Amino acid sequence: MDSANPFDAAFIYMKMPCMDCFEVLKELKDIRPSIMAIILTGYGSIADAVAAIKLGGYHYLTKPCDMSEIEEVLRHAAPGKESGTQKADGPFYQGIVGVSPGIREVISFIRMVKDSNLPVLICGESGTGKELVARALHFDSVRKDHPFIAINCASLKPELLENELFGHVKGAFTGATDVKEGLIKAADNGTLFIDEVGDMNPVVQASLLRFIETGQFRPLGSSKEISVRTRIIAAINKNIEEEVSFKRFRHDLYYRLNVCRINLPSLRDRRDDIPVIMRYFVSRLSEAAGRDITLSTGALERCLVHSWPGNVRELFHLLQRVVILNKDPVITRGHIEAAMQS
């Protein structure tokens, strides 16, 4: 290594013919502890990832990987070099953190459909980041200067949900003393994100389908059609095909939404992203707490083998508990295990 021209990141191939990857990594870290080492391998496994992280590896990429993926990792391995200042790791794309194949596919699809007028259906387990994807679709699109409004169907009774979405005119029902603008109208030229759409009752589903097909709706109690250019993004954490087969979700609405569908992978299916997600969260929590906090290799190792039933949300809340309950500058394996048991 040329001490007069030090470098900040190194890509190391796992299966080199004459040298052992882990020996190279160890020697590099001995010479330059701050170096960001990224392991490239065609033999991906959690065991290799853990071994690399134990020796101070920054990230782990499984071949084949394209140049855009390498550039993305490198940008965050050595941030701020263009301006000469170091910055904390940031989101890879509109707050979506990760470079695994599943997340790259999600980001690629968002970029393809973000400016379309078609509705989008986001499917994924709870805690995978469905609203984050909806926000990316909106805030990286031509609608970014217009409203983004979110509503959760599971939090409202069916009759209240219909009123929230479509609004009502004065005198539409007992107690309707004023005109109420619905969220579909409020989000005109922008985006309405409907979370947990599987909990929407069939009557409201029918009204939503008609709006998607015509761009028009009638407030409760009104005979007048209103036209708006609101884009609908719906999300569900259930198996939507199963909901359709059991007639809990309208098949025609399903077909209309399923044209643009995003399937979000669970955290256990994108374990390569766990280290970079943890570093991202810790950098933000560290900033909020007003103190420098780092992650130990033991903490990263423990999180790599956890099942994460609550997905990214569970990981964030776990790290949040650790930072709040401990004043230590380094998050250790013990901190992680204690937080998992609490």
Image (cartoon, grey):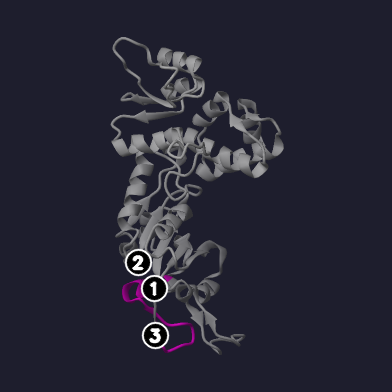
| Location of mark 2 (residue) | 253
Which residue is at 32% across, 48% downward? 108
Q: Is residue 269 magenta?
A: no
Residue type marked 3: Glu
- Please state the horizontal and vertical placement of residue 299, each as a whole percent of the image: 57, 28
Residue at the limit of the structure toward the front, as seen here: 4
Residue at the limit of the structure toward the top, as seen here: 18
Q: Characterize the local packing of mark 3: few (<14), some (14-19) or many (20 or more) Cα atoms within 10 angstroms.
A: few
Q: Quadrant of residue 16?
A: top left
Would you say the residues marked 2 and 1 are in contact, meaning their CB atoms lie under 8 Å apart? yes
| Location of mark 1 (residue) | 206
Q: Is residue 93 above or below residue 231?
A: above
Residue type marked 1: Ala
Mark 1–mark 3 Cα distance, whole angstroms, equals 16 Å
Residue type marked 2: Leu
**Tag in front: 1 or 3:** 3
